[in-house]
Each structure stands twice: as C-alpha cells, then as structure tokens.
Image (tube, rainbow, N blue to C red):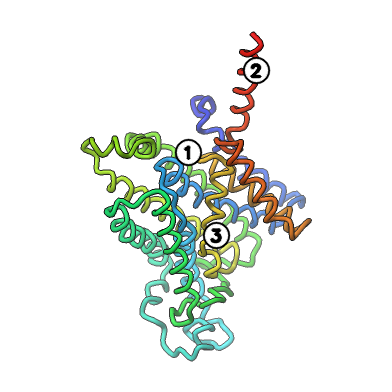
Amino acid sequence: MTTIFKNKSYDYIIFLALFLLILPIGYMLGIISVNTISLWGRYFCFAIAAIGLDMLWGYTGILCMCQALFFCMGGYGIAMHMLLSSSGEGTYGKAIPDFMVWNQVTELPFFWEPFHYFPIAIVCALLIPGLFAGIFGYFIFRSRLKGVYFAIITQALALAMWLIFLRNETMLGGTNGLTDFKQLAGLDLTASSTKLLLYLISCIVLIGVYIGSKKLVNSKFGKILVAIRDSESRIRYTSYEIKNYQLTIFVIAAVIAAIGGILYVPQTGIITPGRMDVKASIEMIIWVALGGRGKLKGAVFGTLLVNFLYSIFTSALPGSWLYVIGILFIVTVLYLDQGVIGLPQQIKKYFSKQKSAEV
C-alpha cells in the first residue's frame, strides 16, 4: 500500500477513488442531486474511451479519428439489449421495438436476435468493435499508412459509418437512434439506486482500465510502442513486426472505447449516430491533447476537465463554448506541449532556468 502512495503513477487512482465516496456521500446528505452523479458517471465513460485513444496516439503515435465510432458500437450493443428487454412493454405491445413497428417491420432482423440475452449482448458489444477494428486495421497497417494519411482514412471511416447508421434501412433507429430504455438486467433505469450503481460501476471500471493500461504501457510491449512512436524507421530494421504491434493496440483501444460506450448508454438513456461522427472523435482528441498525451492520467484529467467546463459554459453562456474550447486548444498546442497535467513541471523548469540565468 505504501508503494502505491509513493508511486506518482498511481496518484490519480487515489483521486478517482475519492469520487467513489465523495459524490455518494453528498447525495445521501442531500447536497448533490442524483442527476449530478449520473452526469459524472458519463464523464467517467468518456475518460475510459480517452485512455484507449491515449495509448494509440500518445504512446504509439497513431492519430485515430474514429475512436467515437467504437464507443458507439459498444453503446448500440447494450442499447439493442435494453430495447428488446423492454419491447414487450411498449405502446404497441409488440415483441419488436416500436421504431420498427412505425417502419412497418413485422419480424425482428436476424442480427438483433443474440441481443435478447444480457451476457451475449455484452460479449457482442465488445467483440464486434474489436473484430471491426481488427479487420480494418489489418489492411491499413499492412499498407503502412501513417501520419496524416491514417488520420484522414479513419476520419473517412467515421463519416461513412455515420452515414450508414443514419439510414432507416439499417434497422438501428436511423437519425433518432435508440432510446426509451426501461431496464437493464432487471434494474429500473429511472430509479435513483440504479443511477448510483451505474456511477459506481463506471468509476470502478475507469480505475481498472487505468491500472491495466498503465501496466501495459510500462511492460515490454508498451516500450516497443513508444519506440515505434519515436523512430518507426529504426524499429523496422529489428526483428519486430511493427504492423502486429500497431494492430494489437488499435484493437485494444477499440475494445476500451466500447467498454465506455456500454456504460454510457444506460446512464444517458439514448444513443444516436451523432455520437459517432467525425466531430465526436475530434472532441476526444482535444480531451487527450488538453490533458497531456502520452500520460494516461492526462487523458483522464483532460476528459473530466473539458466535460465539466462544457457543463458550466453551456448552462451559463450557451453560445460561448466553441470559443472557449478553441482558445484552450490553441493555448495548449502553442504553450503546453505536455498538456495541463504537465503545467506544474513546465513552471518548475521555467523558474529553474531563470535561477540558472541569474547565477
């Protein structure tokens, strides 16, 4: 236990663990509303996805602009299960979701069938994004696409999938997405106890993903990822198969994003194609950049900070948020190369240089 407190890598775990106590205690005392708790639960889900993106971009040097797509794939997986579990209680009393009834669909599409069962739905919500990322990544990394070309093609993928999900023919709710969820694994989603439970699970999963990711990047595998980021051409002269490492971390990041999506949808009550578009993926990149890429705690801190500021500014000054985020991003790029998390270190270095100059 003492080693954990001495190790700076785990400082952030202590900070996150405090949320497990502070907000629920505040709720019990009547200081904090259950909606605030649910809001922070959603922030934690975003932070989970940001950790995957940081491993991909910050540690491997791969700028992926479709992380929100994998986040949504996980979200759609759990949403399909929740919708099916509530379909018998819908307005029309049908065994199929209401939006299909409106579209005059009489039989449940075959790919919806596995989502009747909660364990299978969870497996599918993780497996499908992982397989999709594996197949897509295999052809991309084999072609040695990197840098801006990789960013553009993943951006194009996000745009293409967004357009596909918008269509009613896909039987995934079209523009309106999937909503009107009533229960998850027998729990009433409108109950305060369920919202509190989902918040606690989100926080615990975030801590677990952070610890697992930290161990991964500190392992031999992680050191090779950093070496690929710093000098890919040199690594190519060794016996390491770079594309295998790139593909592996790409799939891992996709599955981590899907975990965030699975936890996000029950707390927000809706999932639409708008959550997977290019803009959503760019937002995730901004979270990681502002927090400090190449430091997993930076990705978490940046996500929580930006989303917290978003809530404040959209309530107080609704039209100002885009200007605020734009200014923050410009300042970070120009002056904070290590992000907000590295600001104390930069200040310390600055004053050290000033003292050296005076001597």
Q: Earlier in the sequence, mark 3 or mark 1?
A: 3
- Residue appearing at x 53%, y 44% in the figure: 299
Rounded to the nearest angstrom, the CA distance separating label 3 from label 1 is 21 Å
Closer-to-camera residue (244/229): 229
Q: Secondary structure at mark 1?
A: loop
- Residue appearing at x 60%, y 64% in the figure: 268
Q: Secondary structure at mark 3?
A: helix
Q: Secondary structure at mark 2?
A: helix
The amino acid at mark 2 is Gln
- Residue appearing at x 74%, y 60% in the figure: 319
At which x and y percent is residue 74?
45, 62
Closer-to-camera residue (128/315): 315
The residue under label 3 is 280
The local crowd at label 3, few if under 14, some if 14 to 19, many if 20 or more residues have their Cα within 10 Å, is some
The amino acid at mark 3 is Ala
The residue under label 1 is 294
Closer-to-camera residue (348/156): 156
The residue under label 2 is 354
